[in-house]
Image (cartoon, rainbow, N blue to C red):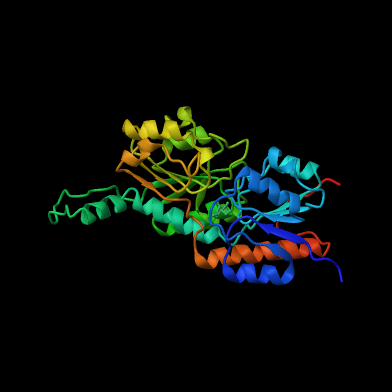
Amino acid sequence: SQKKPVVVVTRKLPDIIETRMMELFDTRLNHDDKPMSQIELIEAVQTADVLVPTVTDKIDLGVLSQANPNLKLIASFGTGVDHIDLATARGRGITVTNTPGVLTEDTADMTMALIMAVPRRLTEGERVMRAGNWQGWSPTGMLGHRIWGKRLGIIGMGRIGQAVARRAKAFGLSIHYHNRNKLPNYIEDELEATYWESLDQMLARMDIISINCPHTPGTFHLLNSRRLKLMPKHAYVVNTSRGEVVDENALTRMLRNGDLAGAGLDVFEHEPAVNPKLLELDNVILLPHMGSATIEGRIDMGEKVLINIKTFIDGHTPPDRVVQAML
Ligand code: 8YV
């Protein structure tokens, strides 16, 4: 019988996934719930035939240049692949897969939760209660902004953006979007979504902006200082995609100066660091990158990783191939 491939997993995964992985492959688990250092990552790529990283592992040129020639697959646990130097992987004959689809609805739920929670000051109200500061109801107490009837502008209308649109429509928001490509008419009709070819023009007209595009060289600081200034003062920003899409310092400055009404941020430019000035703001909800953090979703993601590895080992095209290795 053939030697089982060595699969190196960088972080603790759900038990049921780890058990299955141990049955199928020569699996090297990591029970440490800390991100790997670059030295540990280099060790990992030196032993692995298959590497299973997460968003916290920077698989850059420095790491990939140390990989052993047997490393043929990076089966990432997650959808975003911006932590992997895809061009280098491809050039070195390494295929890359991700886990799309299974975390679409969970991430859209979290996005919707932020869209609701920020204008209605949900966590601010909760802090009042926990501080024992509630003096009782008042006609002018804790007033937020109405959500229904407002304009939501979605940046990035892929799977997650569309799932956000479906939810937001049911909450009475009107749906607008900017995307590299206009969606087919039948999807626009179903979502009652209006396409804005110009991001600048859309930003100037929206009450809430939700970022749902991937982080790529083309979307880095897409919401830069200039574009943030196009938004009306009463507008909110929600980001559940990647911190790098927004200039975090520019956003923080705008929020502090009252040039934006508030923000709901699940992701940050330099995770796990957060601009400390954000922590001082009441009109901001900060979450520790938990958009897809459901028990069910993590198992689904693990199953996708298993299928991608299994298919690849069996000599077929893995279902979630992001880059095909150059041969
Ligand atoms: C994961 C994510 O928590 O899939 C993604 O792109 O950001 C999150 O759902 C993380 O990436 C797992 O690696």
Q: Position of residue 45 (x, y in %)?
A: 72, 49
Res. 12 in view: yes
**Where, by quadrant of the figure, is residue 317 drawn?**
bottom right
**Where, by quadrant of the figure, is residue 88 drawn?**
top right
Seen at 74% across and 66% down, the residue is 25
Q: Position of residue 44 (x, y in %)?
A: 69, 51
Q: Position of residue 294 (x, y in %)?
A: 49, 63
Please tell me which residue lies in front, 8 or 253.
8
**Depicted 273 relative to depicted 2: above or below:** above
Seen at 69% across and 38% down, the residue is 62
**Depicted 152 relative to depicted 107: above or below:** above
**Depicted 58 relative to depicted 23: above or below:** above
Please tell me which residue lies in front, 227 or 61.
61
Please tell me which residue lies in front, 28 or 296.
28
Q: Quadrant of the N terminus?
A: bottom right
Instruction: Specify whether 128 is left or right of 296.
Output: left
**Depicted 35 relative to depicted 14: above or below:** above
Seen at 21% across and 53% down, the residue is 131
Instruction: Specify whether 316 is left or right of 321.
Output: right
